[in-house]
Image (tube, rainbow, N blue to C red):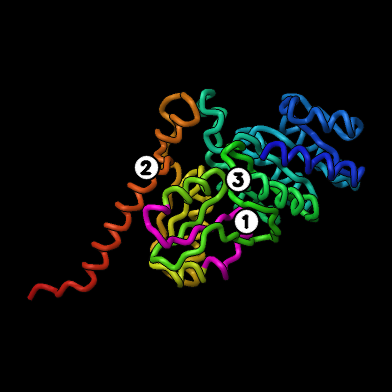
Amino acid sequence: MRNAFSSMLVQAARRDPRVVLLTGDHGYALFDDFRRTCPGQYLNAGVAEQNMVGVAAGLAKGGLRPVVYGLSAFVPVRVLEQIKLDVCYECLPVCFVGDGAGVVYSTLGTSHQSTEDMAALRALPHLGILSPADSAEMTACMRLAMLTAGPVYLRMGKADLGRVHAAEIDLSWGRLLPVRPGDGPIAWVATGSMVQTALAAAAAWPGSAVWSAPCVKPIDADTVADICRRHEAVVVLEEHSVFGGLGSAVAEVAAAFSPTWVCRVGIQDRFSQFCGSYAYLMEEHLLTAEAVVAQVRDFLARVAEAQADRVRPTAA
């Protein structure tokens, strides 16, 4: 996925000299090809992320197409005010790329983990949020981001989890992508790294439909409402807080247009307790396929109990 990002960025810069890359002293090996190919379109802004966003806003007002790259713990979290006022307020065409989203930087602790980035940005007007699951989605997301006239945040999580799609895909703003068809009682909607987990966990419920949501904002409310109508419960997976991310977006649509049971699987209201490998952190936060299956079974048991309570006769 990182290779797909780098390749699409180089292609965009070669095609359009207005494309400029700004980095906060990160991503050197990732951008080797970019620096060789387009050295005049590369700027290392140093460890000064707030200033970097201001510079990008100025470049955008001057007619350029800045891409701002950093770790997602810093872009967007450290620079939220600058994104809001310098870029979104004027609806400037700046693409923010947050790398290592979720708990990818597992050994570096909470300061370098980013589980609140989508929640922080969803409330900002004009800003689109993309969260690709594999190289095909990354290619489509980059193509979409570079054609957009306003600000975009592209969230890059664990980059080497394998392919979800066997071929290239077309993507438009808000679109959900069907990954596995199904007409069972449960549908699964996942984004980023958790699409692979959704595919694995859904095997415990044969006939489950699985959808990928590479576009978190805006989200196609009509498709989400249709999924909610056609299934008894919807399970939403994300390597992000259960508050304010994809699960919240799906629950908001369900509540407004097609009420159903929505199980939000993500990081609970807590920080990582320990440092360790990425696999360890996913276990700690109950985001492995096995842990997800257990959570969904518990959720469905509570749903069954709630439904039974509705039909029990009232004691005389």
Identify which residue is drawn at 73% across, 35% down: 69
- Report, in whole angstroms, how far the alpha carbon at label 1 lies from the one at label 3: 23 Å
Identify which residue is drawn at 62% across, 56% down: 217
Magenta segment, which residues? 202-224
Instruction: Pick whichever, 233 or 260, lies toward us.
Output: 233
Q: Position of residue 203 (x, y in %)?
A: 41, 53
Residue beneath label 2, please?
291
Q: Quadrant of the N terminus?
A: top right
Question: Regarding mark 2 in the picture, which secondary structure is present there?
Answer: helix
Specify the amino acid type for callout 3: Arg
Residue beneath label 3, please?
163
- Report, in whole angstroms, how far the alpha carbon at label 3 lies from the one at label 2: 22 Å
Specify the amino acid type for callout 2: Ala
Residue beneath label 1, please?
217
Q: Are marks 2 and 1 in contact (CB under 8 Å)?
A: no
Q: In this view, does 222 lie above or below 15?
A: below
User: Residue 29's quadrant in the figure?
Assistant: top right
Q: Where is residue 288 in the image (x, y as percent from the top left)?
A: 42, 40
Question: Regarding mark 1 in the picture, which secondary structure is present there?
Answer: strand
Q: Is residue 128 above or below residue 308?
A: above
Identify which residue is drawn at 60% across, 45% down: 163
Question: Regarding mark 3 in the picture, which secondary structure is present there?
Answer: loop
Indicate whether residue 228 is drawn in magenta: no
Sequence-first disc among 2 and 1: 1
Q: In this view, does 31 lie above or below 307?
A: above
Sequence-first disc among 1 and 3: 3
